[in-house]
Amino acid sequence: MRLPLDGLIALLYKVLMQSDAIPAAYRLESGTIRRMLLVTTLITAAAAGFCVFFQAAKTPLFRDAHPFLEDPYDLVGALAVPVAFVAAVLTCARAVRLRVDRTQAPKARLIRRGNLVGLGSILVTLATDLIAVVLQPAQPSRWSSMLVASWHALLAFALVCRRRGTRVRPSADARARAAFVEGGGV
């Protein structure tokens, strides 16, 4: 079926300007959008906590109790902090925009990937911190105990975010429609 040019332009305008005219391949249920926003908010909070943890660990109180200040472990953290923070903030902005404007549904994949980048950088840094603690244990003190306890809390929070994030996926029917459209089926 061929549409005249005016009809095609009107259809494009309708798809782009009206949120109720989203193509079927990109429709997301409101529950999926809410869960995606919740997971993105949790990951943004984890990234903020990660930034605070990384900066607080460099204060003079923790300097003697901090085994991750050595160069290879500190480098991983120094690179991961801005990556996690920027990825989490941009992804949170995309998720909020998706909630407000449902025509942004094709960007749900970017939201999931941004969450993966932010959470991945946090988990990689925590893994290198674990290696640092195992290879160079700190002297037992109140500050080292506090640092290790905050490391455990951050790890638990990141794992909760990861667990919640694995459940946020479009339905199999929506994935099949999207694959059909991307494959040139329409």
Image (spheres, helix red, strand yellow):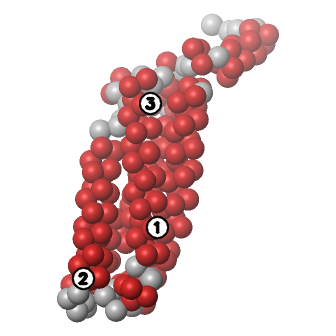
On the image, the x and y values in percent for residue 4 come to 76, 8
On the image, the x and y values in percent for residue 131 come to 26, 81
Q: Residue at point 74% right, 12% down?
A: 10
Rate crowding at label 3 as few (under 14), some (14 to 19) or many (20 or more) other CA atoms within 10 Å: many
The residue most toward the right is 6
**Residue bearing the label numbered 3:** 33
Quadrant of the snapshot with the C terminus:
top right
Rate crowding at label 2 as few (under 14), some (14 to 19) or many (20 or more) other CA atoms within 10 Å: few
Nearer the observer, disc 3 or disc 2? 2
- Mark 2 lies on a secondary structure that is helix
Displayed quadrant of residue 125: bottom left
Displayed quadrant of residue 29: top left
Alpha-carbon distance for marks 3 and 1?
27 Å
Alpha-carbon distance for marks 3 and 2?
43 Å
On the image, the x and y values in percent for residue 27 come to 48, 22
**Which mark is first along the chain, 1 or 2?**
1
**Residue bearing the label numbered 1:** 51
- Mark 1 lies on a secondary structure that is helix
Q: Residue at point 60% right, 27% down?
A: 101
Q: Which mark is drawn over residue 142?
A: 2
Q: Amino acid at mark 2?
A: Arg
Q: Amino acid at mark 1?
A: Cys
**Which mark is first along the chain, 2 or 3?**
3
Task: Please tell me which residue lies in front, 85 or 168.
Answer: 85
Alpha-carbon distance for marks 2 and 1?
22 Å
In the image, taking residue 111 as reference, residue 128 lies left or right, namely: left
- Mark 3 lies on a secondary structure that is helix
Q: Amino acid at mark 3?
A: Ile
